[in-house]
Amino acid sequence: MDFDFGPEDDAFRSEARDWLATHVKGETGRRTWERILGAAGWIGIGWDGDGYGNRRATLTQQVVWAEEYARSAAPPRSGHIGENLLAPTLLAHGTDEQKARFLPPIAAGEELWCQGYSEPGAGSDLAGIRTAAVREPDGRTYRVTGQKIWTSLAHEADWCFVLARTGPGSVRHHGLTFLLVPMDQPGRIEVRPIRQMTGTSDFNEVFFDGAHAEHVVGGEGNGWRVAMSLLGFERGVSTLAQQIGFAEELAGVVRAAVASGAVRDPVVRERLVRQWAELRTMRWNSLRTLGGSGDAGAPSVAKLLWAGWHQRLGELAVLVRGAEAAVGPADWSVSEPYGLDASQHLFLFSRADTIYGGSDQIQRTIIAERVLGLPREPKGAV
């Protein structure tokens, strides 16, 4: 696929850059920022179908927007789960009524979503989930009971898409259903933030105690098919924006290596050059597969590439600073017990890169079974 940027893309880039320069100002709350983006039509520019109040953009223009957003130091997104995961899933599997109900509020930045997949006893083994949903006597409502964990931004979300077991006695990927669950259900849903070693709490435990759900995407019992379709949307244009951030982090590590004198070590220099070369390789691989290569293993390969790369960058970030990297930027206090500078935060947070979003082991199993045709990995009974 040809990814050369033409005159229309250059004009789009100028518009995006000017808009971001005007609107990215100081501290802006996440929800407020989503509404600002939505009001200007910048959410969901890559969706198929009707605009739902958003702009329409070609694939190359979506790349342009993602790159300019990453370069602008704009606030972190809270609405990306709804925009990049749920919306494409609804467009592929949802009813017209579901699209009309949920897509406009996502495009407007009015409703935020979280993803209810992982569970304490299942980890990356999505087919091993135990959260159950029982149909109520009214025939249209489900009562959801169970626990999800590592649920990103659940403490801010209005809705959660939940993979639950609706088939009594079903095992593995059979009998699962993809449900849309409103989070504002006091006494039926409890969200407990998980404090990370970085001091932040973006992940959460979510407990469902008879929570109500009315919306089923893709039909009862078809949750596995819908869930796998959604996971395919986790990669794509967003990986290119991610790489812009990676490049900025790498530049910071290089500056630190020069400042500390570590760059004089030939081993350190070799590692820095390797990080740069691998990042360029990831970019070209992302562009190659962006338009849809038909390669079933492409998302797993991409995840393996960037997760390991970013984790090695975190290790290098503290290595080049030497003993100084072990000391926080400020004295400890009760109100600020986790004072971390950028390199320390990079090192600690990147430890999770090879686990979340599907662990390295899971990605390698997918490649082995679906691409190489190797015998399936034995699964224990659930």
Image (spheres, grey):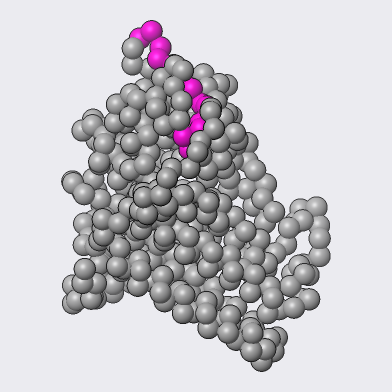
Pinpoint residue 162: horizontal percent, then vertical percent.
Answer: 44, 32
Residue placed most toward the observer, 362 or 24: 362
* Residue located at (38% from left, 66% from top): 240
> In the rendered view, would you say 221 is above or below 345?
above
Pinpoint residue 376: horizontal percent, then vertical percent.
Answer: 43, 43
Q: For residue 174: magenta?
A: no
Question: In the rendered image, which quarter is residue 13 located in?
Answer: bottom left
Pinpoint residue 268: horizontal percent, then vertical percent.
Answer: 63, 83
* Residue located at (81% from left, 65% from top): 331
Left or right: residue 25 versus residue 195 is left
Left or right: residue 311 versus residue 358 is right
Question: In the rendered image, which quarter is residue 255 located in?
Answer: bottom right
Residue placed most toward the observer, 289 or 213: 289
Furthest residue in direction bottom, as rendered:
264
> Which region is colored magenta?
126-138
Q: Is residue 79 visible?
A: no
* Residue located at (80% from left, 52% from top): 334
Left or right: residue 261 versus residue 94 is right
Q: For residue 128: magenta?
A: yes
Residue placed most toward the observer, 196 or 14: 196
Pinpoint residue 141: horizontal percent, then vertical percent.
Answer: 38, 17
Residue placed most toward the observer, 304 or 152: 304
